[in-house]
Amino acid sequence: MTEEIIIAGFGGQGVLSMGKIIAYSGIMQNQEVSWFPAYGPEMRGGTANVTVILSDERISSPTLTAYDTAIILNQQSMDKFESTVKPGGILIYDPNGISKHPTRTDINIYTIEGARIAAEMGNTKIFNMVVLGGYLEVKPLVKLDNVIKGLKKSLHERYHKLIPLNEDAINMGMRNVKKTA
Amino acid sequence: MMKQSKTNKMGELRLMKGNEAFAEAAIRAGVDGYFGYPITPQSEVIEYLMAEKPHERTGMVVLQAESEVASINMLYGGGGSGKKVMTSSSSPGISLMQEGLSYMAGGEVPCVVANVVRGGPGLGDIQPAQSDYFQSVKGGGHGDYRLPVLAPSSVQEMSDFVPIAYELAFRYRTPVLIISDGLIGQMMEKVELFDQMPRLTDEEINELYPWATNGKPKGKKRRVITSLDLDPYKLEKHNFKLQSKYKTIEAEEVRCEIIECEDADYIIIAYGSSARISQKAIQLAREEGLKVGLLRPITLWPFPKKPINELVEKGVKGILSVEMSAGQMVEDVKLAVRERTKVEHFGRYGGVIHSPEEVLEALKNQIIGD
Amino acid sequence: MSEITIKDIIKPENIVYEKTSLMTDKSLSYCPGCGHGTTHRLVMEVLEELGQENDTIGVAPVGCSVLAYEFMNIDMQEAAHGRAPAVATAIKRLWPDKIVFTYQGDGDLAAIGTAETIHACNRGEKIVIVFINNGIYGMTGGQMAPTTLPGMKTSTSPYGRDVNSMGNPLKITELIAQLPGTYYVSRQAVHTPSAVRKAKKAIKKAFQNQLDDKPGLSFVEVVSNCNSGWKMEPVASNVWMEENMFPYYELGDIKLEGNLL
């Protein structure tokens, strides 16, 4: 099994940390993982993206041009990455703020209203966890308890009290992800 | 061909950036002093070290110097006194360090220097590149010298190569370079950290390194660290000694990894992040029925001429040298191959990372042909 | 009356002065009349008197004293041009119980190595810097130094230093005395027996500060002559130094126990 993921959106949406949690979850279940962010000037203009790979085997290239899954959180990223999903692959996006919705018919497209759900839950910072829940529902490659272990590993101890809230957000995401096409 | 290092591992797994793994490995390898200056994309090394308070963990000294020039000369002082010293930088900073590296080669001062390469020339950019190959393997500064160069291609190797680099540095009394790039430095991967190794005590340093200048021992001759000898005949003799050391390193210390070359008609030669990308390219090639293998130099100097020669003698039909540069390592590949088979270069540069698909395309167009 | 030979004079009971064992037997490569030899001797005498022969690492510069390590019979490192303070910084940080000093000339310390000098001083590295200022580049054949006086002729200011195009002489010692990291700063000379005695006292104070782990760097400038570079006979060069160098580079302590005087 090899899962090649691109996560892309605005800086501050928790794109990099979502990738980090998925990567840590992979480690928790003995997989090989890689996490490569766009850095420097690529990050300017408010966009952030990270390539995450989970595999049962040694990972070759940590940078890719085609992905099994794209998790897309703003319009610029949609413009850039819709075409990079492999045929038969998955695109998950938050429709909030998207004006040009994806049009491909050879991939599976899902929406997750992460921004709205997080706002309703009273904490916009857990937005990325809601989206992560959506991804875990659609592609349950990493087990939820490994995600929680991964969260513990990637969060500083003083934030561990927030883990139940994050778990709730993941569950909300799992329940609310919808297939569009 | 990879030699075992003497480290022990208790299976401590972490998700770390290459730069962070390198910094953590420095503490665990018992490094005595890190002297550095921030530059993207490697500033995480000194940031991590400052945050970790290694002085409390092992007694390791960490100092932010006023420049790369000062940093490398701090290594001269510290290494010349028998301590394990380290710095890291990125391309423009490494250019500034060439003065000190030349003096250390001449004065036979051990140290470890990491270059997280970025696009050039000049200020270039801060994206990954491999265009410092010539500077790394051909000497870099003035004078007749070479430095062993290790090229990690994963975050794990950013950690594992630190103790190996020190073994080489002290065995041969030479600076050792670890060459990665923005991709390996900024990427996070799973790392199994090696256990803490003790720093040498002052007594151990005196016993192991009688050449080190840390106070003239009672009743013994004083020691001098210098690269100067105004008598050309004496300096030539010193150079003979250096050259014979380099011959030994060339004979003893070549490291490379050979992947899927047994049945290969074509070979890609690539190091560091290009090796990772090329590995994906050979997977894609094999899915199309093309028999392609990968030879990954781990030491860029000494260059793995012999393993390349063996593949040529087995009759490979062509070799593509893949590097994020305009074609530097390809010159060493050509020297090893001596026109017995086709050799071409492919690579994006200036901070552009080639994709596995581009590598495969280049292999088909430049090597395999119609 | 039998003739008195030199053998009759060289007897233990006649000894009034001995060369310190911390100077090697190698003949000094300095020009006759140069202040380097005297200053070398003072540094080595002080280290011997303080009993630090086995616990000192010296750092030699590039310039006339590039071979200082051939004359100073202790562990030494020969640094790249101007980098001695960086080299010494690391040695002291890694061997905090040892005595570390640099010995540098004006080109090394105040031109190419200005950054290393200022930052080592500013960090308050617990080292000693001995700085020889003779207002000229001696080793490379008499070119202009950062400390060359206005109007002074050198091979790269053959019509005299024009401060409008060549800049003013750099009073680096006053400059580094301003930094909180310096603990003791003094300017001395070695051209007369009384000057030598004062210079030795200053050098000894500098090393004593380091032995006592005083907070900061101790810096002793020695204003010296360069009779070859100045194209004068040794005695004339000392007179010229008194008349021209000393008014510009005033002798005496500049900073004591971290306080500017």
Image (cartoon, coloured by chain):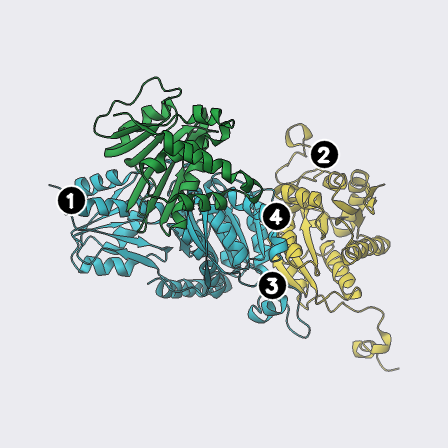
Chain colours: A green, B cyan, C yellow
Residue to which mark 3 is pinned: B224
Work out whether residue B259 or residue C15 is closer to the camera in this orientation and state it: B259
Quadrant location of residue B288? top left
Work out whether residue B237 or residue C1 is closer to the camera in this orientation and state it: B237
Residue to which mark 2 is pinned: C150
Mark nearer the viewer, 1 or 2: 1
Give the class, few, some or many, for how many residues have Cα within 10 Å of label 3's Cα (few <14, many ≥20).
Answer: many
Query: Residue at point 72% right, 52% down?
Result: C126
Could you say whether the residue bearing mark 1 is in a helix, strand or loop?
Answer: loop
Residue to which mark 4 is pinned: B63
Per the model, the C-alpha gap separating discs 4 and 1 is 53 Å
Mark 1 touching mark 2, by CB under 8 A?
no
> Which quarter of the rendered picture does the C terminus of chain A lie within?
top left
Mark 4 touching mark 1, by CB under 8 A?
no
Output the chain of dot 1: B
Work out whether residue B273 or residue B323 is closer to the camera in this orientation and state it: B273
Per the model, the C-alpha gap separating discs 2 and 4 is 39 Å
Q: Position of residue C45 (x, y in %)?
A: 77, 63
Q: Position of residue C159 (x, y in %)?
A: 66, 34
Could you say whether the residue bearing mark 3 is in a helix, strand or loop?
Answer: strand
Q: Position of residue C186 (x, y in %)?
A: 80, 47
Residue to which mark 1 is pinned: B288
Q: Which residue type carries mark 3?
A: Val
Q: Which residue type carries mark 4?
A: Leu
Give the class, few, some or many, for how many residues have Cα within 10 Å of label 1's Cα (few <14, many ≥20).
Answer: few
Mark nearer the viewer, 3 or 1: 1
Per the model, the C-alpha gap separating discs 3 and 1 is 62 Å
Q: Which residue type carries mark 1?
A: Glu
Mark nearer the viewer, 2 or 3: 3
Mark 4 touching mark 3, by CB under 8 A?
no
Instruction: Specify whether B97 is left or right of C49.
Output: left
